[in-house]
Image: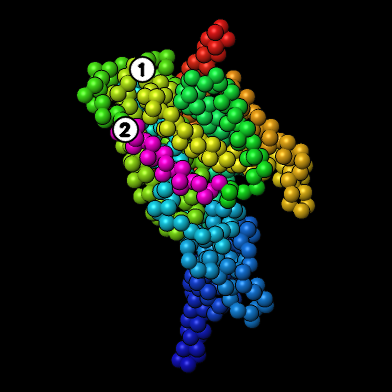
Amino acid sequence: MATLLRSKLSNVATTVSNKSQAKVSGMFARMGFQAATDEEAVGFAHCDDLDFEHRQGLQMDILKTEGEPCGDEGAEPPVEGDIHYQRGGGAPLPPSGSKDQALGAGGEFGGHDKPKITAWEAGWNVTNAIQGMFVLGLPYAILHGGYLGLFLIIFAAVVCCYTGKILIACLYEENEDGEVVRVRDSYVAIANACCAPRFPTLGGRVVNVAQIIELVMTCILYVVVSGNLMYNSFPGLPVSQKSWAIIATAVLLPCAFLKNLKAVSKFSLLCTLAHFVINILVIAYCLSRARDWAWEKVKFYIDVKKFPISIGIIVFSYTSQIFLPSLEGNMQQPSEFHCMMNWTHIAACVLKGLFALVAYLTWADETKEVITDNLPGSIRAVVNIFLVAKALLSYPLPFFAAVEVLEKSLFQEGSRAFFPACYGGDGRLKSWGLTLRCALVVFTLLMAIYVPHFALLMGLTGSLTGAGLCFLLPSLFHLRLLWRKLLWHQVFFDVAIFVIGGICSVSGFVHSLEGLIEAYRTNAED
């Protein structure tokens, strides 16, 4: 009897133990541990694997196989870069080096063979973008804004630095393991993600249009400033500003034949160094007249009608958001991006503020749209010739970028292309494609001839596309993509930047347009 009782109790205990083991194993299987000691546990794990693959499979299709694919059950486990998703390790890692190497900025999740740049080199690129020729219009902004214009130079630097950082934050998301990984590679990809799933391509088209407008307007400004500088350098010659613009365009016409920027990239460093030397010469001349500085002219009042134009000028001088995703993706240490943005924008803020203030104190109410026009004749001719050379050598960069955006948007999207490809099967540019490029060069000339007003065009562009790409869209995208992870002060900053940027954009655009209409009427009467 006792033996029978012990046998029954043993059977019950074994049954309970097996069921408990199955439940515990199933629970661990849900947590990601393999528990193949029981059929029920294996069933739990298999169901979880199916669900996991269903949720993650589409995201991993874009990763290309670098090693041998997994075969049967006896095959080796997935290697780094394999197309299969690794159960315990999140997304497959790049073969070596940077964690973001599989998501390079140069293309769609490519970039393995592209050389990486240091934080100093990235900072140099940002400095080139925000310390270019367009600082020549900042003293004109102080003329209509006084101390408030100086404050706006500082404010724009802070806001543009912040929006550059949050724009890069929109490139990243957390994977299943809580790791932050780069899932987008461009401004357009961020815009498309914000408009998905209803309008998956609308955001990218809006950004492309804004980029094209800004790039083409930059080309126009280079032609305008070239004609302006040459006309004021040689006022005795019987050549008008429009004629100088035509001559400059004739020099720029070969840009239509460009296939890459190797031919002009060699001059980039030289042009930038020359520009810094020119800025130093202008400041040195202003310091030589420090005894005559008109401090009483710098006031807290603003010209209500013309100050919004100054806002556009200042914002346009800080525009760099277009290429920041590509720049960050090509950095050796992307973690240094924030530090790089801080010191570049601090340096830009200090240099721009000093340049604008010193130049305005020197010429006060006589400050012109392009500050070098205020220099004495002997110095002005030399400085302006260097500036014209820099403008002409800088023109191919935005021109080529605008051509690439147009060709990619309208001519190179397969069945979705609006027009046939510009290139033949052998890679040569077709005649009609060359004609379109020449037409773009001529268009910049016509705009420069009929609207030869550097500051007004700069203010119009800054208010229209500069504010949109630097203020409105980054804050809107940040709220849209990372809403659940933002703290209250981040939401406040984003909303405040969006509202203030919207008001400044509309106001600056309207007043710049009014100024252009008024200037056009004045020229027509003359």
In this rendering, the answer to whether 19 lies above or below 464 is below
Rendering coords of residue 302 (x, y %): 34, 17
Q: Which amino acid does label 2 sit on?
A: Ile
Kindly identify the residue that appears in the image at 31 percent across and 33 percent down: 283
In-front residue for pair 496/89: 496
- Residue denoted by label 1: 366
**Residue 7 colored magenta?**
no
Marks 1 and 2, Cα distance to the nearest angstrom? 17 Å
- Say if residue 387 shows up in the picture: yes
**Residue 277 colored magenta?**
yes
In this rendering, the answer to whether 256 lies above or below 35 is above
Quadrant placement of the C terminus: top right
Q: How crowded is mark 2: few (under 14 residues within 10 Å), some or many (20 or more)?
A: some
Rendering coords of residue 329 (x, y %): 50, 53
State the extent of the magenta-drawn residues as a range: 264-284
Kindly identify the residue that appears in the image at 50 percent across and 23 percent down: 231
In-front residue for pair 232/264: 232
- Residue denoted by label 2: 283
**Left or right: where 148 falls relative to 232:** left
In-front residue for pair 120/193: 120
Number of the label disc, if any, that sits on residue 167? none
Q: Which amino acid does label 1 sit on?
A: Glu
Determine whether the residue tagged by mark 2 lies in a helix, strand or loop: helix
